[in-house]
Amino acid sequence: MFLIKRDKKKEDIELLKFLRNILGCKPKNISIYKLSLIHKSCSIIDEKGNKLNNERLEYLGDAVLSSIVGEFLFKKYPLKGEGFLTEMRSKIVSRASLNKLSVKIGLSNLIEYNRGAHSSSFGSVNGDAFEALVGAIYLDRGYNFAYKILTKKILSIHLDIDELENTTWNYKSKIIDWCQKNRKKISFEVVESKLINHRMHYIVQVLIDEEPQEQAEDFSIKAAEQLAAEKTLKKILENEQQISTQTGMVEN
């Protein structure tokens, strides 16, 4: 068993330092922030036998984050349509993006979780904690304060919005185009769905000519399809490059 847990006194000092850097002030209720760092694999049992972890804060933070990012993009791109705004929000709040943000701001170093406990949710530990942190900030200081911190001190500094805007997201359309050009049949199959942290969690697999390809997982079927399509397309292009290189070597 590998329990990711530190000395409590040192942990409190690290958390306060982190929060002062992010919030610019001392938190009103430090206990909420402590709870936001506890993964369900390290749940605390209270006097009534209830398991306490960051799942509820993650649920709240997910809703708050979506609202804040939506408002942020609405103001940043006054002439863009609904489709563009929706795609940009999906890019920002994707599990991969939130995992990276958690690492960049140093949040990932503070999370308590048990590596020895087998769980498919460990791949999203950092992103889940980021959402829980957003929920904690909202409860501690309110929406306006949370909006200011996220947009001014996190998104604007640690996320390259312009680069994200130019990043290809619709890998599903790209791989469908590739299959059409190569006269292949493609489909996306939900191979598993389950409830994790009060939300449905989906694993999607790409099938080409009914042959299983890459899998990916996320909290929405569309996002999982995009991730699976990206992984599959990357593998296809790598194989094509290898074949092209080998052919060139033979001709030479």
Image (cartoon, grey):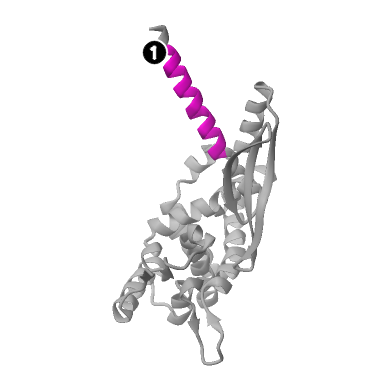
57 lies left or right of 114: right
Q: With respect to residue 177, does 131 lie above or below?
A: below
Task: In the rendered view, tell whether residue 217 sits above or below residue 129.
Answer: above
Does 96 lie within the magenta span? no
Q: Residue furthest bottom?
A: 47
Q: Which one is in front, 249 or 225?
A: 249
Q: Which amino acid does label 1 sit on?
A: Met
Give the residue drawn at x 49%, y 57%. Answer: 123
Q: Is residue 127 visible?
A: no
Q: Is the magenta stretch mostly helix, strand or loop?
A: helix
* Residue located 45% across and 14% down the image: 247
Please provide the residue range marked out in magenta: 230-248
Residue at the spot of label 1: 249
Where's residue 29, x and y in %? 46, 82
Classify 10 Å Cα crowding around label 1: few (below 14), some (14-19), many (20 and above). few
Q: Residue at x 35, y 75 (%)?
A: 16
Q: Residue 206: name its quadrant.
A: top right
Closer to the camera in the image, 93 or 77:
93
